[in-house]
Amino acid sequence: MPARAGSRTALVTGVRVAAGRGTTRVVFDLTAPVAHHVFALHDPERIVVDLDRTTLFAIPEALSLKGTALRSVRYGKQGQGLRIVFDVSGGLVPKSFVLPPSESLGHRLVVDLRPSGTRREARPAKSTRQSARPVEPALRVRRDLVIAIDPGHGGKDPGATGRRGTREKDVVLSIARRLKALIDKEPGMRAVMTRDQDVFIPLRGRISKARRYKADIFVSIHADAARNRSARGASVYVLSPRGATSEHARWLAQNENKVDLVGGVSLGDKDEVLKSVLLDLSQTATLEDSFELAGEILKQLKRVGRVRSKRVEQAGFVVLKSPDIPSVLVETAFISNPSEERRLRKRSHQEALAKAILSGLKDYLRSNAPPDTRLASIRGSRHVIRKGETLSTIASRYRVGLGRLRRVNALHGDRIRVGQVLTIPAQDS
């Protein structure tokens, strides 16, 4: 499963309950850090746990609740995430915290439930909003978001060649370098290159590099070619369903993947059915993110010049096949078209293409920046309302107070509409 909270789906792989010294503890085993919201409701008494962008794999109703303060458990979809409701036997005060992966365990969310009025909880219960980041002070530093840029071809593989001798491998490397320079100037963002020289790198080697860099996004840059020299226009691709299916089978079949990780979950100790489910969920979430990212980049490319297709296209490109990194391939223009070849040779046009790709990335990240990144905490970010979202889940996702979110957006209630744009204030401390 993807490891990136806020833009990819995490998975609840286990739920454990224990009781002792008046406290009931619930532990959620997760494949990735998630933003969460825990609160109590009354008449009847219950504890609610909302997990942002999370899918359930474990079966909570199979829990043994004997000897605990829990009476029953229910769950269901909540916007883009998951809501789990525990019916409890009396008034309880919830307190939650997160634990980073250890040598034997992955990400965990711990919810402690204590009777109200105990000495340890002298203050009234109130909602707990936390981003899923480790509580140790040394691990509180937010990280930069990492974008892997992949200039196509290189070395012995020149790619397509225009009539004036322009080689694809040279043009795309120049555009990629410009894009990297632009990204590195953005606060909270950092770019890495699969190649920064005229060298040949196997296609799957490019994916491996992105994974070693722990990239959040993968962008491959190319220049198209066709026998018909009148063909023109940019296009953006994501992985096709057929390509995803074949890659799924390859990951399950190859020995080296038996110890690989999918969002922090080792496949080595899983049976074939569970491995297949984990990979399928991972690819589904990643493809959704890839489509959204590709759409934003395509919008920006339309401002630079002609696009070949008004929609995001799909193909089985090998470099798009990482199951846990949103990946897009940008065909900047047709190098086989004489007029577009001339434009590709110009520094000004290369810069314009790099700026268009950056703008698309930024538009995508306004609503999809991982909560553990610096980018997620930048003041004045935007969120576009999607189907199924509520104001409370949005506030929880960005770790801001619901009242502050209303005030900043001049909202007098909780009614919102699909497509509405909200300004997200700086996160609560």
Image (spheres, rainbow, N blue to C red):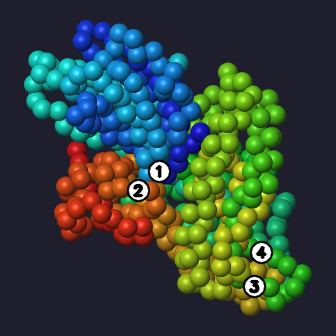
Are there few (<14), some (14-19), or many (20+) residues within 10 Å of tag 4? many
Quickly name the residue at label 1: 80
Are there few (<14), some (14-19), or many (20+) residues within 10 Å of tag 3? many
Are there few (<14), some (14-19), or many (20+) residues within 10 Å of tag 1? some
**Disc sitting over residue 389 in the figure:** 2
Left or right? Give the position of 410 relative to 107.
left
Q: Find the distance from the CA under tag 3 to the CA under tag 2.
A: 40 Å
**Residue 274's quadrant in the figure?**
top right
Question: Residue 159, how many percent across, how many down?
Answer: 82, 68
Contact check, label 1 and label 3, Cβ < 8 Å: no
Counting residues from the N terminus, which is met first, the one under dot 1 or under dot 3?
A: 1
Question: What amino acid does circle 1 point to?
Answer: Gln
Question: Residue 273, how many percent across, how many down?
Answer: 72, 30
Q: Relative to 263, does residue 428 appear above or below in the rendering?
A: below
Label 4 vs label 1, nearer the camera? 1
Question: What amino acid does circle 3 point to?
Answer: Arg
